[in-house]
Image (cartoon, grey):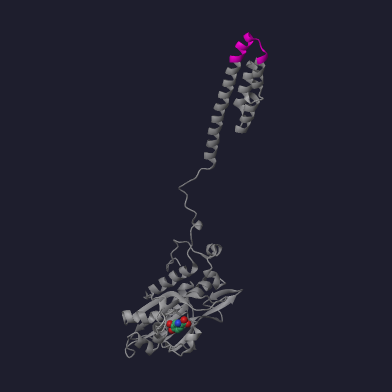
Amino acid sequence: MDDLREKYLGLIAGAADEAALEALRVEAVGKKGEISLKMRELGRMTPEERQVAGPALNALKDEINAALAAKKAGLADAALDDRLRAEWLDVTLPGRDRRAGSIHPVSQVWEEVTAIFAELGFAVAEGPQIESDWHNFDALNIPGHHSSREEMDTFYMARAEGDDRPPHVLRTHTSPVQIRSMELQGAPLRIICPGRVFRSDYDQTHTPMFHQLEGLAIDTDISMANLKWCLEEFAARLFNVEKIEVRFRASHFPFTEPSAEIDFRCSWVDGQLRLGEGDDWLEAGGSGMVHPNVLRAGGIDPEVYQGFAFGLGIDRLAMLKYGIPDLRAFFESDIRWLRQYGFRALDVPTLRAG
Ligand code: DAH
């Protein structure tokens, strides 16, 4: 019995882990364990022998069970210590910010253009996305029969049966905000309106919802020269270049006279856009001097005041600035795309930081 005690207490003390300990338990005190087998021999002993050997074997079994339990507790403590050492977490480390949501490139550019025009003295104006037919078309000198009503692939709202008033529309451009701003504030006026617009159109370069930036400046001494300077200043700051040349191309819009398309001088080198240099021209949007009928519709006297207006595509500016090829991906909410092109939430655009 002394040999057994020594053997098992030694083995238990040296067990490396709980599995080894369990194997020892089975070997010593399991059903067919060495000590259990010894206990079976008690039956073959004389009563006198049994009186000595029985309690001694029981005591040995208890001693070994106690040693197993103590070692098991020790191993568990050691295992926990190992885990605590291996899995410690430094809660003072900064968070993993890429796991957080990101700012959509459209929102980013929206903020950028707002910051730039704010520096140039323009306030941000807003108007409803569900717009009256009058604000969206008539007041902008687009009469009922005019072709641009059809060209704009308008979404019309439903009217109640028997109501013959013209239906409201999802605004097809941000230009109605010109009228609403004139109505609200009168002249002089200097506003931009970044906003959502809607047209029934869908392909690689058209989505049914997209974003425009409207600009409007009204005063007693406004000319196309002021417009050109503002656009050049704006583009140079947005694209972070020293100077950008703007070219006016004669055009026609019902709400401006004269009207001009805005082109930026650029070059394409290996599929990469460079602004401010080269012999190519990039179409950026429409502009012109506000038509007297539009000023009148907004309650402003065209004999006293005149103004310039322009309309640019925000999504297009974002694609150009950040090299994003497909417009439709903007609105598919693909988390991988948002991770690639999104901006960190606290990276707020400013003129100094870009
Ligand atoms: N509203 C026009 C469009 O959506 C863009 C535009 C052109 C706006 C000329 C203007 C402008 O303010 O003067 O196509």
Image location (x, y in percent) of residue 289: 41, 87
- The N terminus lies in quadrant: top right
Image location (x, y in percent) of residue 333: 52, 66
The residue located at (61%, 15%) in the rendering is 54
Q: Residue furthest front?
A: 162
Quarter assignment of residue 53: top right
Q: Is residue 329 magenta?
A: no
The residue located at (55%, 75%) in the rendering is 274
Image location (x, y in percent) of residue 202: 55, 76
> Quick check: can you spot residue 274?
yes
Segment tinted magenta in the rendering:
43-55
> Quick check: can you spot residue 242?
no
Q: Is residue 45 magenta?
A: yes
Horizontal relation, residue 274 to residue 353: left or right? right
The residue located at (56%, 78%) in the rendering is 267
Image location (x, y in percent) of residue 15: 61, 29
Quarter assignment of residue 5: top right
> Which secondary structure type mostly characterizes the magenta part of the structure?
helix
Nearest to the observer: residue 244 or residue 338: 338
> In the displayed structure, would residue 165 be above or below residue 111?
below
> In the displayed structure, would residue 13 be above or below residue 184?
above
Quarter assignment of residue 131: bottom left
Q: Quadrant of ligand 1?
A: bottom left
Q: Residue furthest top?
A: 48
